[in-house]
Amino acid sequence: MNIKHLLDKAFSEALSKLVGSDTPGIVKQAQREEFGHYQANGVMAAAKKLKTNPRELAEKLIEDIGLKGTCFTEIAGPGFVNIHLTSDFVAQQLNSVIKDSSLGVPSTEVSKIVVDYSGPNLAKEMHIGHLRSTAIGDSLVRVLEFVGHDVIRANHVGDWGAQFGSLLAYMDQLRQAGQSLSTELTDLEKFYQAASALFKSDESFAKTARSYVVRLQNGDNECLSLWNQFIEESIRHSQEVYEKFNITLGVNDIRAESAYNNVLPIVVQELEEQQLLVESEGAKCVFLDEFKGKGDKPLPAIIQKSDGGYPYMATDLAATRYRTQELGADKVLYVVGGEQLLHLRQVFAVAKAAGYIHEDQEFLHLPFGGVLKEDGLRFKTRDGADVKLIDVLDEAILRAFNVVSEKNPALSESDRGEVARVVGIGAVKYAELSKNRSTDYIFDWDTMLAFEGNTAPYLQYTYTRIRSMFRRAGTDSLQGSIVLGENAELRLGVKLLQFPETIESTLDDYQANVLCNYLYELCGFFNTFYEQCPVLIAEEPSKTSRLLLCELTAKTLRQGLELLGIETVEQM
């Protein structure tokens, strides 16, 4: 149950009844120190409409609000209505939620939603620049599926284009020299750098590389064989990252750029039939009034280049066409960096003009900022190369192992290794998701691996603290119900009931940091409760009631972290 929705509905209905028309009320949560208290606004506007005294109208409203047993109300100031949830109502809701596998989160009206995320370039290995799209997108699909949507993961990988000419020519050169390609491709980054360097330094090789692009595009069998070998190895590298990073993307979620190659001429034909294409300097372009460049000059969306090649605009239009016409998507979310803002705006605008996107279909760009070092510069190696994402994850696990070994040396080495994996990967992911996605953030090892503050280790440790309590209690099966007597119990209880509201808010603007902040605050309320309300030494029925509160807190923490793609362990 969403408590705010319950109060909004009751308040609006009561106010509309008094005013005689549909008059929405606005209920908002009061300050944190008044936890469990809400304030209703709207009386002042209604009183002005009726030309009556606001406090008198508020008194009538209180009599008719229809929430007996749920809350008690009082009038404050000139006509504000304060709503205070009763402890009995909160306890009743908690006893219902604890039996619900979805923790009170209602199923939504099902939509088919495509989420486009990660999208690495298969010419080289995934780097830290892929961290944000991958983590944000995967958390988003988890939350969308949790509330009941039909979600399609779309990994729009780059596997086509001019750079593959150099790679294929280099592969052929190594093969003719008798070298093992499988050995050479174990480090894609070095392979890519070697091919690129040769392209720049050897004109004969560069000429051969350019010919390989043409051969590839024309479907040459030998060239395609080399290309397939390279793509298979590249996908293996990507899947290794996804598995280590606890990402739900699989091979079947890939629909690469090359998948649209045969559709590109059809896109051009359909745009011509719509009379949208204009030839400009030999290229076929779409000019729309809303896109202007310097000096108010029309900005072209290039669909086909003067040499007959197709840029990203054409491929992305083909993808849009596929997602609406073939997949029947109601909504498509693009988790793509902010630097692609103009490009995607043009893609969506041209697609709408072409009839690929209809009025009842929604396409949204969810931009994000960059990952920076402490000096505020982009995260690069000392020689300026992109940092491999797999290296970042391995480093996180190693650092977490050292932290865990220091905190709990009594754990066996194998147990420390498993805890380090969960803590290290969780720390990287949470450091990303706990920030507003639209801003840049500093990548700082010490902060993200800390066991204090708004970090994954703090949340994971709180969970293990609860689980250790149940081991000491010697039970995982509780018979009884939650009864709230102490203020710390009520505050924790109300916070637990706000999980459905948090999930809804997370999806309002697709911001995972809303869920992160909720889980962090939940841990704070739990730890205050733990300090102020003895659990294992309490007398019955308080002992069972408090253990049930602990159980629901652990369930909520575990579920919330799972929606972020973060695992938990039983001890740390």
Image: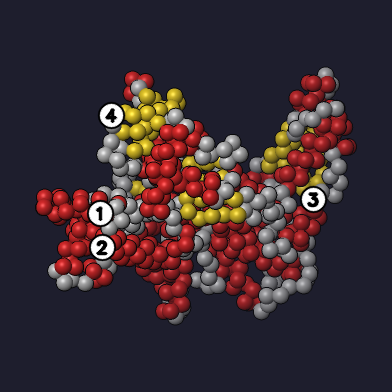
Q: Amino acid at mark 3?
A: Thr
> In the structure shown, which secondary structural element does the residue marked by tag 3 occupy?
loop
Q: Residues within 10 Å of mark 3 (few under 14, many from 20)?
A: some
Is 347 positioned to the left or the right of 27 in the image?
A: left
Circle 1 residue: 215
Q: Amino acid at mark 2?
A: Glu
Tell me whether the residue at label 1 lies in contact with that at label 2, contact meaning CB atoms closer than 8 angstroms. yes
> In the structure shown, which secondary structural element does the residue marked by tag 1 occupy?
helix
Q: Residue 531 at x, y = what percent?
A: 63, 62
Tell me the tag on residue 281.
Answer: 4
Lower position in the chain sequence, tag 4 or tag 1: 1
Tell me whether the residue at label 4 lies in contact with that at label 1, contact meaning CB atoms closer than 8 angstroms. no
Distance from the alpha carbon under mark 3 to that under mark 4: 72 Å
362 or 564: nearer the eye? 362
Distance from the alpha carbon under mark 2 to that under mark 4: 35 Å
Judge whether 324 appears above or below 252 on screen: above
Q: Residue at x 31, y 28 (%)?
A: 280
Tell me whether the residue at label 1 lies in contact with that at label 3, contact meaning CB atoms closer than 8 angstroms. no
Tell me the tag on residue 222.
Answer: 2
Distance from the alpha carbon under mark 3 to that under mark 2: 75 Å
Tell me the tag on residue 86.
Answer: 3
Lower position in the chain sequence, tag 2 or tag 4: 2
> In the structure shown, which secondary structural element does the residue marked by tag 4 occupy?
loop
Q: Amino acid at mark 4?
A: Glu
Lower position in the chain sequence, tag 3 or tag 4: 3
Distance from the alpha carbon under mark 1 to that under mark 2: 9 Å
